[in-house]
Image (spheres, rainbow, N blue to C red):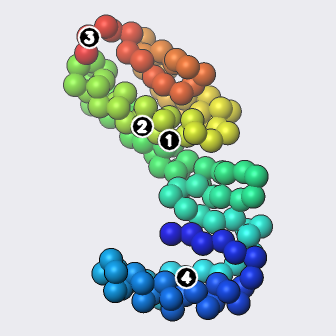
């Protein structure tokens, strides 16, 4: 939950009101160490993105997880000499397209392009191609 207001005193006032509402109506407890009051220009870290006025950035953790997943698949196919087809290719495409689906909602065209071109092993390009402005990977084989 993120609440934004111009008056810091109002935000301080509303904390006990929210605690009581959450506890009595929906049986949730507001964690006292997870309440942050900060200036709006610093942005709000929420659901993997940084929300600032007039811009939403993809969080560094999400970018790092995407990079680690690419490394995982590179090592999986190179290290064990698996052929990227069948069930393995389905899992690879689902994983990559999940990250691409998340990132395409933000201004990340250059990031998606860089992640795929620079980090994805050349071994994959015989089995997949990029579709929709780096927002989806598609199998070259019709039926997987």
Task: For mark 4, give the secondary structure.
Answer: loop
Residue 47 visible at all: yes
Check disc 2 and report the residue beneath it. 98
Q: Calculate the distance from the C-alpha at mark 1 to the C-alpha at mark 4.
A: 26 Å
Specify which label sits upstream in the sequence, 2 or 4: 4
Looking at the rendered structure, which numbered label has been put on residue 102?
1
Confirm or deny contact between disc 3 and disc 4 (CB under 8 A). Answer: no
Give the answer, above or below, for where 97 lies relative to 18. Answer: above
Is label 3 or label 4 in front? Answer: 4
Residue 73, horizontal then vertical, whole percent: 38, 34
> Dot 1 surroundings within 10 Å: few (below 14), some, or many (20 or more)?
some
SS state under label 2: helix
Numbered circle sitting on residue 143: 3
Whole-percent x and y of residue 111? Answer: 64, 37
Residue 78 shows in the view:
no
Tell me whether the residue at label 1 lies in contact with that at label 2, contact meaning CB atoms closer than 8 angstroms. Answer: yes
Q: CA distance from mark 1 to mark 2?
A: 6 Å
Whole-number angstrom distance, CA of label 2 to CA of label 4: 30 Å
Please tell me which residue lies in front, 86 or 121: 86
Q: Are marks 3 and 1 in contact (CB under 8 Å)?
A: no
Find disc 4 in the rendering and name its residue. 35
**Gap between marks 3 and 1 measured at Cα:** 25 Å
What secondary structure is found at the residue carrying circle 1?
helix
Q: Earlier in the sequence, mark 2 or mark 3?
A: 2
Q: Quadrant of the C terminus?
A: top left
- Give the SS element for disc 3: loop
């Amino acid at each position: 939950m993120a609440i934004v207001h111009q008056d810091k005193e109002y935000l301080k006032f509303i904390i006990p009101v929210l605690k009581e509402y959450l506890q009595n109506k929906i049986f949730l407890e507001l964690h006292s160490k997870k309440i942050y009051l900060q200036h709006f220009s610093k942005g709000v870290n929420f659901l993997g993105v940084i929300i600032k006025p007039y811009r939403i950035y993809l969080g560094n953790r999400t970018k790092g997880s995407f990079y680690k997943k690419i490394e995982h698949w590179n090592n999986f196919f190179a290290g064990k000499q698996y052929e990227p087809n069948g069930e393995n290719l389905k899992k690879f495409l689902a994983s990559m397209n999940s990250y691409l689906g998340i990132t395409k909602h933000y201004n990340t065209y250059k990031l998606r392009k860089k992640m795929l071109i620079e980090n994805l092993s050349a071994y994959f390009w015989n089995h997949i191609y990029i579709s929709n402005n780096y927002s989806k990977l598609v199998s070259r084989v019709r039926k997987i």
